């Protein structure tokens, strides 16, 4: 462990030598012309009462959770469901704006070209199935244009 970050929180440890306060063991060592390890050793030794170990200077490090970080939240996307004949639609919600906004709608949709159902990630824009060259999903059922 680096001498200047000897505290368990990773912050520098303040040291007091004969009434003079140093923000870290390294700065105390530089000011006194000693090595960092001997400053640390003397700060913990009862034989050197003028050396005092004061602990981490800025206090414990703040623990951050993903919720309080200032990064964008992911879109709330519904999981795909089994083929239902196009009955259900579900919204994809963006939680980064207030109030939360619907960015697109997913669901089973008939292809505009072949007429078969496919799961579309955006029912208003991806309206062709994958087989017809669109951005939708794979169609279900037999291809009506294919030769028997
Ligand atoms: Zn199609």
Image (cartoon, rainbow, N blue to C red):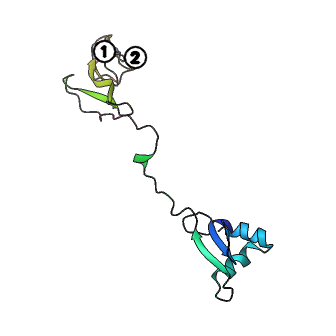
Task: Check disc 1: other Cα within 10 Å, few if <14, some if 14-19, many if 20+.
Answer: many
Residue at left offset 51%, top offset 60%: 61
Give the image location of residue 17, x and y in percent.
Answer: 69, 76
First-in-chain label (1 vs 2): 1
Was residue 126 drawn as part of the magenta stretch in this picture? no
Task: Tell me if the residue at label 2 has its CB under 8 Å from ligand 1.
Answer: yes
* Image: magenta residue range: 72-81
Residue on which the image places disc 1: 111
Q: Please state if 6 lies on the left or on the right of 89 as rendered.
A: right
Q: Is residue 101 above or below residue 31?
A: above
Q: Please state if 57 lies on the left or on the right of 100 as rendered.
A: right
Residue at left offset 23%, top offset 28%: 83
Give the image location of residue 132, x and y in percent.
Answer: 38, 14
Assess whether mark 2 and mark 1 are in contact (beta carbons under 8 angstroms). Answer: yes
Where ligand 1 lies, by image quadrant? top left
Secondary structure of the residue carrying tag 2 is loop
Q: Is residue 86 above or below residue 64?
A: above
Residue at left offset 31%, top offset 19%: 123
Residue on which the image places disc 2: 134
Was residue 79 drawn as part of the magenta stretch in this picture? yes
Q: Please state if 97 lies on the left or on the right of 18 as rendered.
A: left
Give the image location of residue 69, x and y in percent.
Answer: 45, 45
Between 9 and 125, the residue placed more toward the observer is 9
Q: Is residue 22 above or below residue 42?
A: above
Between 72 and 139, the residue placed more toward the observer is 72
């Amino acid at each position: 462990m680096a001498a200047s970050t000897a505290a368990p929180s990773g912050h520098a440890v303040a040291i007091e030598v004969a009434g003079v306060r140093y923000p870290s063991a390294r700065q105390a060592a530089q000011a006194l012309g000693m090595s960092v390890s001997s400053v640390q050793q003397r700060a913990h030794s009862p034989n050197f009462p003028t050396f005092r170990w004061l602990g981490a200077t800025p206090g414990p490090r703040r623990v951050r959770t993903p919720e309080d970080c200032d990064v964008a939240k992911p879109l709330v996307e519904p999981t795909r469901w089994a083929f239902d004949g196009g009955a259900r639609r579900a919204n994809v919600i963006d939680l980064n704006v207030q109030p939360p906004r619907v960015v697109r709608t997913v669901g089973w949709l008939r292809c505009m070209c072949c007429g078969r159902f496919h799961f579309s990630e955006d029912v208003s824009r991806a309206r062709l199935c994958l087989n017809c060259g669109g951005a939708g999903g794979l169609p279900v059922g037999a291809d009506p244009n294919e030769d028997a």
